[in-house]
Amino acid sequence: MKITELPDHYLVIDDNGAARLVTPGPDSLADMQALVDGWIECVRLPGSVDCWINEEGLIRNPQDFSYNYLATHIVREWTGQPYDLVGPCVFASNDGEGATIPLPFGFTKDTLNKGMELTPRYQSEQSLLLFHTVQECADLMNESRREFMEAKA
């Protein structure tokens, strides 16, 4: 699949490795809190890219979150720092004045070109829908976490 441009989006990587494009809602703080399941913390990357994570991810119960291998790899590659990320991560951008804005297409394109695969909202032989709403994405991640914990028990 060759993607040449994308509408406004966040890139959300669940701790199970699923990568989704999410359409931003009207309130970026509410978006980030819903997508990381709680209080947010920001890891700054070069190029005005931000990685939003759950502030308590490393100290919450192990059944809440798993180590996020894909997001950790991306952040380490972009920053050169030994970050360890737990739980879902949301990649977005900032306007330089503190406001969160959609992710630049170049970041998503670079990540896709390095082998990341997107989890579509819907796929058939005739169509492909890539974009999830914030609520759909949060619900999918919660369901995945619930199924994981049931299988683990």
Image (tube, helix red, strand yellow):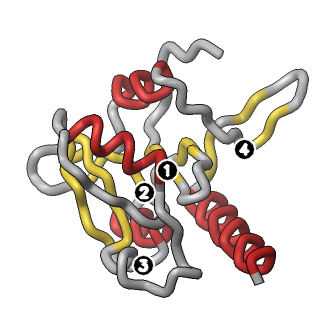
Q: Which residue is mark 2?
A: 89
As helix, strand or loop, the secondary structure at mark 2 comes to: strand
Quarter of the image for residue 15 reads bottom right
C-alpha span from label 1 to label 3: 15 Å
C-alpha span from label 1 to label 4: 13 Å
Q: Characterize the local packing of mark 3: few (<14), some (14-19) or many (20 or more) Cα atoms within 10 angstroms.
A: some
Q: Is 152 placed left or right of 112 in the picture? A: right
Q: Which residue is mark 1?
A: 12
Q: Characterize the local packing of mark 4: few (<14), some (14-19) or many (20 or more) Cα atoms within 10 angstroms.
A: some
Q: Which residue is mark 4?
A: 121
Asked if disc 3 and disc 4 are in contact, CB closer than 8 Å, the reply is: no
The three-letter code of the residue at mark 1 reads Val
Asked if disc 2 and disc 1 are in contact, CB closer than 8 Å, the reply is: yes
Query: Disc 2 or 3, which lies upstream in sequence?
Result: 3
Q: Is 57 placed left or right of 132 in the picture? A: left
As helix, strand or loop, the secondary structure at mark 1 comes to: strand
The three-letter code of the residue at mark 3 reads Gly
User: Of all residues shown, which one is farthest toward the right?
Assistant: 125
Quarter holding the C terminus is bottom right
Q: Position of residue 152 (x, y in %)?
A: 74, 77
Quarter holding the N terminus is top right
C-alpha span from label 2 to label 4: 18 Å
C-alpha span from label 2 to label 3: 12 Å
In the rendered structure, find residue 38 and report the number of the disc placed on it.
Answer: 3
Query: Disc 1 or 4, which lies upstream in sequence?
Result: 1
As helix, strand or loop, the secondary structure at mark 4 comes to: loop
Asked if disc 2 and disc 3 are in contact, CB closer than 8 Å, the reply is: no
Query: Disc 2 or 1, which lies upstream in sequence?
Result: 1
Query: Disc 3 or 4, which lies upstream in sequence?
Result: 3
Which of label 2 and label 3 is nearer to you? 2
Q: Nearer the viewer, residue 14 or 27?
A: 14
**Residue under the image location 31 percent in, 52 percent down:** 51
